[in-house]
Amino acid sequence: MTIPYAIDIEPRATIPVAGGSAVFPVRRIYCIGRNYAAHAREMGGDPTREAPFFFQKAADAVQFCPENETVQHPYPTMTSNYHHEVEMVVALKSGGRNIEEKDALTHVFGYAVGLDMTRRDLQDEAKAAKRPWEVGKSADHSAPVGPLHPVSSVGHPSRGKISVSVDSEPRQSSDLSDMIWSVPEQISILSLYFELKAGDIIFTGTPEGVGKVERGQTMRAYVEGLGAISLAVV
Ligand code: MN
């Protein structure tokens, strides 16, 4: 017998799979902080291989952005310093605890281009006051992401250009090979803290050049091999 829900449930956030009709159901969004040396320095951190750190966004912060289309991205409330962070996104088809680095990639379903949108003023206040980061990092719509490219079509990207421009002006430009912690390392370390499961996605960190976007501007985020997404901030 199925026990009825007391209220209607919101559908799960999903990300369409490139070149197919299926959608990937999102369970959790994990993000890694300071995973490119030059960005660690610009945020006042130490770019050596100190242990990576993680935070989460609400799963329904996903905003799907089809390729070859500019989607409207709502400027969030309670900020006057809203930042783009372009990141490669890893989607898991399976998971576990204490995953070894050598096995980590077997859990990956695919990859996408994404943006870890950040209310930087609120994040900075939280850091200064030693408070949690949610208001800075987990705003509604703060996880724009493009179509998910399965491993069967793109393999496991470990090098290639990653960039974002605002109104065609280059803002962030780097290479995936500049990550401090590789994708297998991130999965392995993250699985020490959480039991990873099918449907989890990981934002793998952003390179240097993070900056402000305003209403009326258009962001274009790109990862080589994974395409580009375009968002008009409204
Ligand atoms: Mn980030």
Image (cartoon, rainbow, N blue to C red):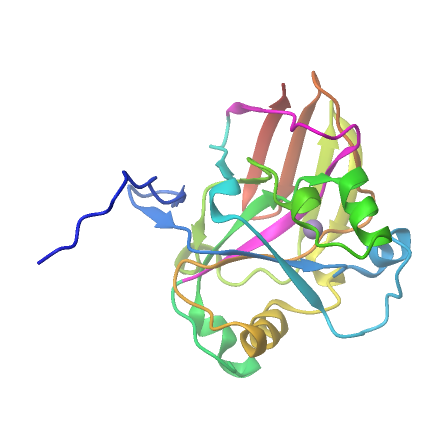
Q: Which quarter of the image is occupied by the N terminus?
A: bottom left
Q: Out of 12 and 110, give the one closest to the viewer.
A: 12
Q: Quadrant of residue 78?
A: top right
Position of residue 163 relative to residue 73, above or below, is below
Could you tell whether 153 is left or right of 145 in the image? Answer: left
Magenta segment includes 76: yes
Could you tell whether 190 is left or right of 34 in the image? Answer: left
In percent of width and height, residue 117 lies at 66, 40
Position of residue 204 relative to residue 215, above or below, is below
Q: Which quarter of the image is occupied by the C terminus?
A: top right
Residue located farthest toward the front when viewing the structure as drawn: 6
Q: Out of 122 and 209, give the one closest to the viewer.
A: 122
Could you tell whether 152 is left or right of 49 in the image? Answer: left
Report the magenta residues as a range.
69-92
Residue drawn at point x = 47 percent, y = 42 percent: 60
In percent of width and height, residue 65 lies at 50, 33
Residue located farthest toward the left when viewing the structure as drawn: 1
In percent of width and height, residue 224 lies at 61, 47
Residue drawn at point x = 50 percent, y = 27 percent: 68
Q: How many marks?
A: 0
Q: Out of 24 and 67, give the one closest to the viewer.
A: 24
Magenta segment includes 139: no
In percent of width and height, residue 179 lies at 73, 63
Residue drawn at point x = 80 percent, y = 42 percent: 210
Q: Quadrant of residue 23?
A: top left
